[in-house]
Every structure is written in C-alpha cells, then in structure tokens.
Image (cartoon, rainbow, N blue to C red):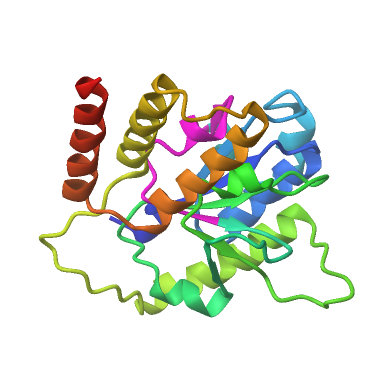
C-alpha cells in the first residue's frame, strides 16, 4: 500500500471555493488524494471549486464532508495542525524538518484553518502537534492552498526517499483518534455528572486542556483501554 494513501488533508471551515479547488490541485500534484472538508462556507462541491481544481476533479469528487472536526478525526492516528504563530499551549511545536520523524504507516492528517481566522485553540486541542511553516516574520500570512502545497511537497519528498523512521515496537499499537476521543468523552461525562465544571465560562478552556493532555501523551490502545476502564469504574462508584 502506498504511504500517500495514509495521509489526509483537512480543510476546517474553508471560506473560498477557489482555495478549495486549488488545494485539491496541489494535493494531486504530489500524489495525495484524501481530502476532508469540515463545515465549508460555500456549497460543496460547486462549479467554481471544480473549475479551480483543473485536473483534480477526482480528489473533489471522492472527498469527505463533516459538520464538525471531531467526526472528521475518527479514523486518524496523528493530527498535525498548521499555525502561522506558536500558541502558548502545552502542545508539541514542530518544524518542517521534524516531519521526517512522523510514522507515515499510521493514519496522519494535516489540519488547516479557515482563511479568515485560522485555527482556534479549541481546534488545535485535537492535534498531536502544531506545525509552523517558516516565512518572513514581518509577513507571515500564507494563502491556504500555498500552505498545503508546501507541506504536500515536503511530505511527498520524505515518502519517496523512504526515510520515514519511527521505530516503536511492533507489539505496541498506538491508540487511534477514535479511541482517544471516546476515552476523553467518557472522562468528561463523568466529570459533568459530579458537577466538576462549576464555572460555565471556564468549561471550554478546561476541556481544551484535558484534550491537550490526552493527545500529547501518545497513548497505546492498551493504555487507552485501561484509562477508559478507570473512568467507567469511577462513574459506577457514585
């Protein structure tokens, strides 16, 4: 199986049809075909998207559309969020050269924010890493499709050079995003049941921090199962 089939490009709330089409074209330039769209502003697909995609209509036609980010990440192992600036968040920041260390035998998604506002801290809390593309510090704003093309070209060169090295024991199976989301939601439900989130205004930031903790830990399937059992037992004890 080609490693490029393990890689998904996710556009979160894209605003412009032309950018969606250009992203599909850029993906096909570097032999990627898995495009996911979350809550697009324009009707998807439309004639302008298809026209801008030029020869990449097949990428548009087989793309997946979701209403929210959590659903889009169900079958993903690692999420790498692109950001024009480093956040003051307890999350791993990586550079382009660090992409050589990613295991592309896993399901990897590159997440891109909307043209207007980028990615919020809430959306970034679902990521394993944030990636900043080096640009002119006085002019950091990159067009959405340009950001995607830079990453697509870089990852394509890594895959083609077969330098992907991530030597974990084959006996250890990393937890999928679906397993981690299920575990996190079980924890959150039990916390809600005991009125842990007393101050409503603080709840969103507390949820962000919890997700940051769970995703940063890079849990195995077994560890996720153990923690899920712990959270379920704590819920029953009440």
Query: Which residue appears farthest toward the left when viewing the image?
Result: 171
Residue 113 x %, y %: 69, 47
Residue 47 seen in the figure: yes
Give how far across and how far down residue 91 sits, in percent: 52, 61
179 or 97: nearer the eye? 179
Q: 152 left or right of 22?
A: left
Instruction: Please tell me which residue is depicted at 76% across the width and 43% down the height of the picture.
Output: 52
Observer-nearest residue: 142 or 222?
A: 222
Examine the structure image and report whether residue 96 is included in the region drawn in magenta.
no
Taking the spot 69% from the left edge, 48% from the top edge, the residue there is: 119
Question: Would you say residue 69 sits in the magenta stretch?
Answer: yes
Magenta part of the chain:
62-80
Q: Left or right: 140 with respect to 133?
A: right
Residue plotted at (79% across, 33% down): 48
Q: Quadrant of residue 85?
A: bottom right
The answer to whether 143 appears left or right of 111 in the picture is right
Q: Nearer the viewer, residue 236 or 41?
A: 236
How far across and down, in percent of the image, does residue 179 sit? 30, 38
Q: Position of residue 105 (x, y in %)?
A: 30, 60
**If the image is split into quadrants, where does the N terminus sit?**
bottom left
């Amino acid at each position: 199986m080609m490693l490029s089939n393990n890689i998904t490009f996710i556009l979160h709330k894209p605003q412009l049809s032309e950018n969606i089409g250009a992203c599909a074209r850029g993906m096909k330039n570097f032999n990627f075909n898995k495009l996911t769209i979350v809550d697009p502003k324009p009707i998807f697909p439309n004639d302008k998207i298809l026209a801008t995609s030029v020869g990449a209509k097949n990428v548009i036609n087989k793309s997946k559309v979701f209403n929210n980010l959590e659903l889009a990440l169900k079958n993903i192992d690692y999420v790498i969020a692109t950001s024009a600036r480093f956040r003051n968040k307890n999350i791993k920041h990586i550079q382009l050269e660090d992409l050589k260390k990613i295991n592309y035998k896993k399901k990897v998604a590159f997440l891109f924010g909307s043209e207007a506002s980028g990615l919020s801290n809430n959306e970034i809390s679902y990521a394993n890493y944030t990636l900043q593309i080096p640009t002119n510090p006085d002019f950091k704003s990159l067009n959405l499709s340009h950001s995607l093309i830079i990453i697509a070209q870089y990852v394509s060169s890594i895959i083609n050079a077969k330098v992907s090295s991530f030597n974990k024991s084959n006996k250890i199976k990393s937890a999928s995003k679906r397993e981690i989301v299920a575990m996190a939601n079980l924890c959150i439900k039990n916390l809600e049941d005991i009125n842990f989130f007393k101050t409503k205004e603080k709840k969103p930031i507390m949820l962000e921090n919890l997700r940051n903790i769970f995703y940063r830990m890079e849990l195995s399937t077994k560890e996720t199962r153990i923690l899920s059992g712990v959270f379920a037992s704590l819920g029953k004890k009440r």
